[in-house]
Image (cartoon, coloured by chain):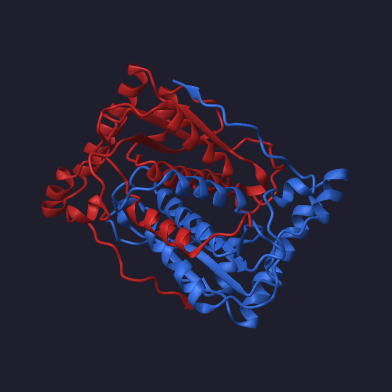
Chain colours: A red, B blue
Amino acid sequence: MVGQFSPAFRDELVTLMRWRRDVRRFRTDPVPEDVLARCLETLSLAPSVGLSEPWRILRVLSPSSRAACLANFRDCNARALDGLDGAKAATYSRLKLSGMAEAPIQLAVFCDDTTTKGSGLGAATMPETRAYSVVGAITLLWLALRAEGLGLGWVSILDPDRLARDLDVPPGWRFIGYLCIGWPEKDDMVPELEREGWESRSPALHLETR
Amino acid sequence: MVGQFSPAFRDELVTLMRWRRDVRRFRTDPVPEDVLARCLETLSLAPSVGLSEPWRILRVLSPSSRAACLANFRDCNARALDGLDGAKAATYSRLKLSGMAEAPIQLAVFCDDTTTKGSGLGAATMPETRAYSVVGAITLLWLALRAEGLGLGWVSILDPDRLARDLDVPPGWRFIGYLCIGWPEKDDMVPELEREGWESRSPALHLETR
């Protein structure tokens, strides 16, 4: 029956989640446009507060736009390194934290905080739920890409105001994340930050009750 | 090969995304604890900024906690209705916007904005990415539940400060969403807000380029 899923599918869904990584090391060979297009369709399948569908996506294509975003990242990343001491600074400086210099597909993702779609339903006490809707959409895209063998890296080491100016973004659009997409150099089940000794994953989740 | 996915799996993944709904109408029969537990494990598979894993989950079990959260929702929902006129108010008053009175499983989800895990990596210019990490985790849980035939409804028509007080939440935890979980009364491919004439989904996504 439609809308019913098998144990085998559920297992494979968890396997997909286990192999999903934040990818920063991309091969430079192109991503077929039809593959990208069908992955992008999953954005529209995301839940959104009040059916507001506030996701707004810019495809960053031109060399000048890419250069501006990369310079933004490099400045913010240098400042982040300046704020660290000793061993932590040494580890940080070894990390590769974005694939912006190489990734064949780059998307700047925004939330239209001014949209009237949905008439504000669900967002009166928590307007941030519009941004959360955009994050849910990115999460679906991430899984769809990974299922195609593609990697996504979410870059947040950026000055949002500078990025909005550089990309001539409409007023009212809130920057959510900069997505690098392409074929990963390699697949891995372990996050790069764990492999490089920055941080490790926690054991099982603990739920408190109330 | 591990980490490779077939076209058939990819199709079924999109089918799952198409059947995922925000559910507000639940049957009251219980959810087996082992099914819930394996769905909750997917929260830990979510990407998180700097590997900060800032998700904090309270399972809302006691009648007094549930009553406090339900009263919070009812007050906020009444205020939202007061702000609407005419036909929109009439439509709004017909909507069922939470399953908090019925859902067998209820979770209050928070983001620990004070966590030192991840040492702030990626969150210096955009501290909101910690909350976004929690939203990604909820999105994975949503899919895992739906793959089991379970529904999730995300309630945001709540006063976050009141909820934090009522549930005696540690300082520094930011409220992200209240999740109702259970067996849906029925499965549907069309969002309830669309069926009830509140809002409709957009046609295909349009990407601008820069």
Q: Judge whether B30 appears above or below B80 on screen.
A: below
Res. A4 visible in picture: yes
Left or right: where does residue B37 sit relative to residue B115? right
Look at the image and tell me whether residue A128 can be seen.
no
Residue A89 is situated, as x and y percent measured from the top left of the image, at 15, 48
Residue toward you, A128 or B48: B48
**Residue B204 in the image: x percent, y percent?**
60, 31
Say which quarter of the image contains residue A204.
bottom left
Residue B5 in the image: x percent, y percent? 38, 48
Q: In this view, does A72 lie to the left or right of A122?
A: left
Q: Residue at x 39, y 41 (%)?
A: A148
The quarter in which the C terminus of chain B is drawn is top left
Return the residue nearer the eye: B169 or A62.
A62
Which residue sits at x=52%, y=78%? B33
Rendered position, A164 above or below B57: above
Q: Quadrant of residue A147?
A: top left
Q: Is residue A33 left or right of residue B106?
A: left
- Disc tally is 0
Q: In this view, does B203 lie to the left or right of A187?
A: right
Seen at 31% across and 70% down, the residue is A203
Residue B85, image x and y in percent?
A: 85, 45
Which quarter of the figure has residue B184? bottom right
Q: Which residue is drawn at 58% across and 45% down?
A: A130
Tell me if residue A165 comes above or below residue B123 in the rendering. Answer: above
